């Protein structure tokens, strides 16, 4: 049914969205802005440049550089101590014999560090980061690039995503999309299969029995 499998990283393979939420809220508070979880959820799946634009629009005058520095330092320290995998990750990756890629809105340095820390590097033929594309998710370019690197058609790719932003990008690229919502609930408007976890989603998509 498929020629390759593409995975988002944060919130899909590694449990980092909750870490980003708590460290982000603390970073905002350190600059005198007590933001809500709903505000933080609006940033899920966005690359840093896009998130910074959203933040500046809602909180004009905030020191974006100071915020990002504080947030990055706290986040990096947290995942250095512990980086948990999402349920079913190792079982699913071990069962897949097709070529696989990670397609992430993280920067290349951060993506490589998280993948290595989580012990996932050997499973993937390539990692497409936000640094590799001109247009980040929800634009389809990241998934189109991943398919090209694996020498497969996007329509023959199965994608696992947690956010609406990522699911939209994969859908626009012509991929089959399994969405497993993480921190932010979703009705799966861009998903072919909406699942509670990776293994269930893989079974729904016919990837595993």
Image (tube, helix red, strand yellow):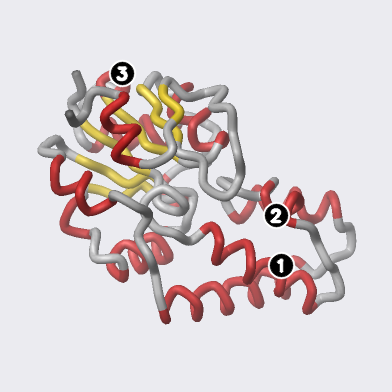
Question: How far is disc 2 from disc 1 in space, using C-alphas?
Answer: 8 Å
* Residue that numbered label 3 is attached to: 155
Q: Earlier in the sequence, mark 2 or mark 1?
A: 1
Query: Is disc 2 placed on a helix, strand or loop?
Result: helix
Count residues near mark 1 (Cα–Cα under 10 Å), then give few for <14, some for 14-19, many for 20+.
Answer: some
Front-most of residues 135 and 24: 24
The spot of residue 91 in percent (x, y) is 20, 49
Residue at the spot 40% in from the left edge and 65% down from the top edge: 109
Q: Earlier in the sequence, mark 3 or mark 1?
A: 1
Question: How far is disc 2 from disc 3 in space, using C-alphas?
Answer: 32 Å
Q: Quadrant of the C terminus?
A: top left
Residue 25, label in figure: 1
* Residue that numbered label 2 is attached to: 40
Q: Is residue 21 above or below residue 41?
A: below
Q: Quadrant of residue 92?
A: top left
Left or right of residue 145: residue 95: left
Q: Is residue 104 above or below residue 200?
A: below
The spot of residue 131 in percent (x, y) is 45, 52
Q: How many discs mark residues in the rendered view?
A: 3
Q: Is residue 170 above or below residue 166?
A: above
Callouts 3 and 1 close, C-beta under 8 Å: no
Left or right of residue 19: residue 55: right
Q: Quadrant of residue 133?
A: top left
Q: Earlier in the sequence, mark 2 or mark 3?
A: 2
Count residues near mark 2 (Cα–Cα under 10 Å), then give few for <14, some for 14-19, many for 20+.
Answer: some
Left or right of residue 25: residue 73: left
Callouts 2 and 3 close, C-beta under 8 Å: no
Q: Quadrant of the N terminus?
A: top left
Residue at the spot 63% in from the left edge and 71% down from the top edge: 23
């Amino acid at each position: 049914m498929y020629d390759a499998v593409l995975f988002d990283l944060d919130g899909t393979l590694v449990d980092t969205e909750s870490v980003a939420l708590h460290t982000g809220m603390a970073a905002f508070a350190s600059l005198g802005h007590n933001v809500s979880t709903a505000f933080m959820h609006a940033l899920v799946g966005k690359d840093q440049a896009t998130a910074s634009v959203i933040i500046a629009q809602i909180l004009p005058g905030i020191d974006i550089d100071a915020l990002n520095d504080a947030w990055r330092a706290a986040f990096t320290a947290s995942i250095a101590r512990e980086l948990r995998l999402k349920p079913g990750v190792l079982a699913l990756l071990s069962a897949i014999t097709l070529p696989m890629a990670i397609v992430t809105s993280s920067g290349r340095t951060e993506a490589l560090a998280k993948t290595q820390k989580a012990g996932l590097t050997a499973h993937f033929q390539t990692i497409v980061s936000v640094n590799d594309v001109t247009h980040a998710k929800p634009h389809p370019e990241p998934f189109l690039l991943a398919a090209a690197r694996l020498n497969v058609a996007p329509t023959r790719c199965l994608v696992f995503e947690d956010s609406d932003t990522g699911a939209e990008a994969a859908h626009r690229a012509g991929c089959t999309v399994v969405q497993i919502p993480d921190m932010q609930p979703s009705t799966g408007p861009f998903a072919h299969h909406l699942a509670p976890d990776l293994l269930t989603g893989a079974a729904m998509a016919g990837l595993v029995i």
